[in-house]
């Protein structure tokens, strides 16, 4: 369910989480380490900077760093910026309205998957992935 963009972003944030406090890393270096297109990753990291997930520093010694401790950064808040996780609450079959009282044929099964996935994202931090 997670997009390629979100997966690359999480990998980039993991790289940034390994930096000493206050140090930055350039997008080219990060892109090389995670095997991502540099220009694409740069645009994604700028978007995250605008949302306060990372800090961007311009100049010769510039680059990116995390805006806060990795243990305070859950995947839900990161992925939601890129994919609008709230859309996953829509009916799997596209039925309107679809709810507990008027369910579609896939409602109960989709609800289980959707909740498990959202819980995983909400309860997993960048720090958790460092330990993996």
Image: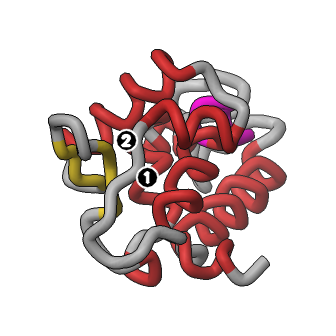
Q: Residues within 10 Å of mark 2 (few under 14, many from 20)?
A: some
Q: Which quadrant would the N terminus be assigned to in this image?
A: top right
Q: Secondary structure at mark 2?
A: helix
Up-down relation of residue 28 to residue 10 (above or below)? above
Task: Name the side, left or right, on which 124 lies relative to 40.
Answer: right
Q: Which corner quadrant of the image does residue 21 belong to?
A: bottom left
Quarter of the figure that contains the C terminus: bottom right
Q: Nearer the viewer, residue 77 or 18?
A: 18
Residue 37 in the image: x percent, y percent? 60, 20
The reply, left or right, for residue 68 in relation to residue 123 is left
Residue under pointer 2: 81
| Residue 44 sits in quarter | top left
Q: Residues within 10 Å of mark 1 (few under 14, many from 20)?
A: many
Q: Are marks 1 and 2 in contact (CB under 8 Å)?
A: yes
Label 1 secondary element: helix
Q: Which residues are magenta?
A: 1-6
Disc number for residue 78: 1
Residue at 40% of width from left, 40% of height from top? 26
**Residue 78 picture location, percent across and down:** 43, 52
Q: Residue at x 44, y 44 (%)?
A: 86
Q: Position of residue 20 (x, y in %)?
A: 41, 76
């Amino acid at each position: 369910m997670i997009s390629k963009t979100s997966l690359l972003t999480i990998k980039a944030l993991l790289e940034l989480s390994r930096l000493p406090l206050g140090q930055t890393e350039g997008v080219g270096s990060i892109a090389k380490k995670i095997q991502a297109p540099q220009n694409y990753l740069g645009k994604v990291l700028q978007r995250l900077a605008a949302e306060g997930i990372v800090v961007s520093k311009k100049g010769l010694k510039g680059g990116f760093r995390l805006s806060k401790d990795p243990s305070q950064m859950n995947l839900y808040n990161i992925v939601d910026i890129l994919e609008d996780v709230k859309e996953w609450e829509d009916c799997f079959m596209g039925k309107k309205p679809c709810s507990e009282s008027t369910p579609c044929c896939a409602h109960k099964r989709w609800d289980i998957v959707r909740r498990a996935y959202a819980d995983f994202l909400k309860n997993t931090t960048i720090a958790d992935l460092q330990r993996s």
